[in-house]
Image: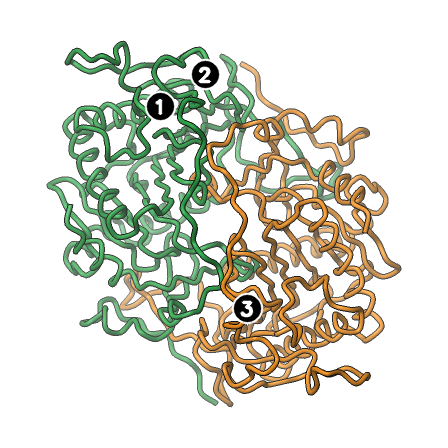
Chain colours: A orange, B green
Amino acid sequence: MTHIPSVATKRLPGDRERATTNEMRYDWLADRWVIIAPQRTARPDDFINQPLQTQDPATCPFCFGKELETPTAVATYNSRKASPYAPWRVRVVPNKFPAVNPWLDGLVSAELEHELHADDRINLFQRRELFGAHEVIIESPKHIQSITDLDSESIDLVFQAYRDRLCFWLQEQKCAYAVLFKNVGPDAGASLTHSHSQLIATDLLPTDVKRTVDRMRLFHKKESACLFCRMAQDEIENQARVVEETPDFVAFCPFASRMPSMITLVPKSHHARFDNLDSFATKQLSWLTHRLIRRIEKCYPDTAYNFIIHTAPSCLEATEYFHWRMELFPRLTKVAGFEWGSDCYINPLAPEEAAHRLRAAGV
Amino acid sequence: MTHIPSVATKRLPGDRERATTNEMRYDWLADRWVIIAPQRTARPDDFINQPLQTQDPATCPFCFGKELETPTAVATYNSRKASPYAPWRVRVVPNKFPAVNPWLDGLVSAELEHELHADDRINLFQRRELFGAHEVIIESPKHIQSITDLDSESIDLVFQAYRDRLCFWLQEQKCAYAVLFKNVGPDAGASLTHSHSQLIATDLLPTDVKRTVDRMRLFHKKESACLFCRMAQDEIENQARVVEETPDFVAFCPFASRMPSMITLVPKSHHARFDNLDSFATKQLSWLTHRLIRRIEKCYPDTAYNFIIHTAPSCLEATEYFHWRMELFPRLTKVAGFEWGSDCYINPLAPEEAAHRLRAAGV
């Protein structure tokens, strides 16, 4: 009988070459193994890709002149330069079809509930009301479909809006949790083509987010260091998975990424809150994001993608273990039965190879 | 300041009517809240659905006469009646593009590893080899695209194949974990149209599966009852979410389902192992599955769907708390940025309404 040993190797020379057989990699943050299966890419495919067909842009409710088709803006951002599209460059509105019920002044976020009982018997039918916010960040008055069509000043305004709205819901209104995300293309969950992002804030910290917060706290307790500070340092040292760096940020394909060509972007030094970003960092970050999305668009034209900004929930008792991060990922694979059944993801593209391709895409 | 109370109501009269505002529901098994947001269905959509285009069936490697295009069969099933498609009705072959490395005689499954260290420092780059099996169950010699096109004898043979292969990998070969799943349509992760299912067996129990096993054990410890025995009993009593019953099985839309029109099917009495199913139960189950998939096809024509059979992992120390189950779900929504960021799902269709629609679809 042969026991299969774990290969406890931190860094392997020639990582790219090794990834031609199937292997598992451990995602420490998620406490989850991922299958890297490069052989899967050779599969035949019965389904023929068809170009997307979209509605007439004249129906778009996000364009300049259609402001009455959305709820009233809660914030607008404008350029220093005059523009025929005044009075706004970026416009934040409540989502007309919200997933949460409106936050009311004076509400406080709920305590985390882990074991739920009624009359000392486990209640399998527990429900609660849900309060918070669901906002849309409209990123241009023009009907552009990619954030990469924005000039540098506009994309900087977009990132200022992200920061300000997260700050408002987490620090002023004290919602337990808020996340900023972008869906581009129907496969990424978008329903409108006009470039936009969304923010959802809730009065309860989702259980799985709490789990990752607990993992960061555990790492800090055991190692007296922040998980993502360590990871950024290791990735910069190794370079095999780094896509791009600026003085303050590094973007890399994570070692155990669940999806092909996923990119994690973190500040190199420790910062818990994206919503505390200063304007110098915002500029650098918007510049880098623009370049990363152009790399994705060059490698995988017309592919749907998402990005997500994970910032510290408002209920943290300390911020030395939480490091904010952004995740970007083209939607190249579908979540199939195995993944739904096991929560174990099969990624057909090794992150080292993904980083190589993204680096090679000139921008 | 108003604290938002949890609504600890087990069953509410008029469940269907209530579900017109957003609410959260707690999935006890997954320890996860789900957002039920019926208002989301009214969203506009820029993207125009197009009919699927597929390759010429002449290229299909699963049809009768193409047996040399797949690896050699590990099992075949035949009808009692003569058939022009002899010598097989159902054929099980190793996947030509496997996600796992081949199982070797004498291998033993790995212990669950939770904390992974190297030199007393947490290793963020842990990898391991992965052994197991990846098989394809080809469900007909003809180029049919839905299991509902099979006659009752054939679908019964398909379920016998599911049972036998799970039994082989879990009970004979003692793989830690095995799951049977079906992907239909590209949105469900399928790459071939010919009706087929897949089995993946691994030498390591995925972390999230272990988590659900632990939840079932916890429920049993606290309640001296099996979670799914209790849930089946409650659903049958309530009826609001029941889609269909047979003497031995019940199919219902789970109270906190992550996706619209998801169906859970369980045996009414306690059984841990699908792979121990007797032939009477197999017949009843294949009959019921056929009807449930017809209901899905009638409610949502041409929609992709998955099903998954969760049976007990081989490493359980006892089977009184694990109850096998099957999950079926059309792929009506996409996993978008919010879901990826928070692992909190937004389901726009209340399960009570979903069950009502599925029941109303005549079959």
Q: Amino acid at mark 1?
A: Ile
Taking depth in this image into account, of A323 and B77 the one nearest to the observer is B77
- Residue A346 percent coordinates (x, y): 55, 37
The answer as to whether the residues below labels 3 and 2 share one chain is: no
Q: On the rendered structure, is A162 left or right of A47?
A: right
CA gap between label 1 and label 2 equals: 11 Å
Residue under pointer 2: B70
* Nearer the camera: disc 3 or disc 2: 3
Give the letter of the chain under mark 2.
B
Q: Does A195 appear above or below B279?
A: below
Residue shown at 39% from the left, 56% from the top: B258
Disc 3 marks which amino acid? Pro
Name which quarter of the figure residue B138 lies in. top left
User: SS of the residue at dot 2?
Assistant: loop
Q: What residue is shown with label 1?
A: B138
Which element carries disc 3, helix, strand or loop?
Answer: helix
Instruction: First in sequence, mark 1 or 2: give its number.
Output: 2
User: For mark 3, what is the residue?
Assistant: A57
Q: Is residue A98 above or below residue A299?
A: below
User: Which residue is at 63% across, 63% downward?
Assistant: A145
Using the rendered image, report if marks 1 and 2 lie on a common chain: yes
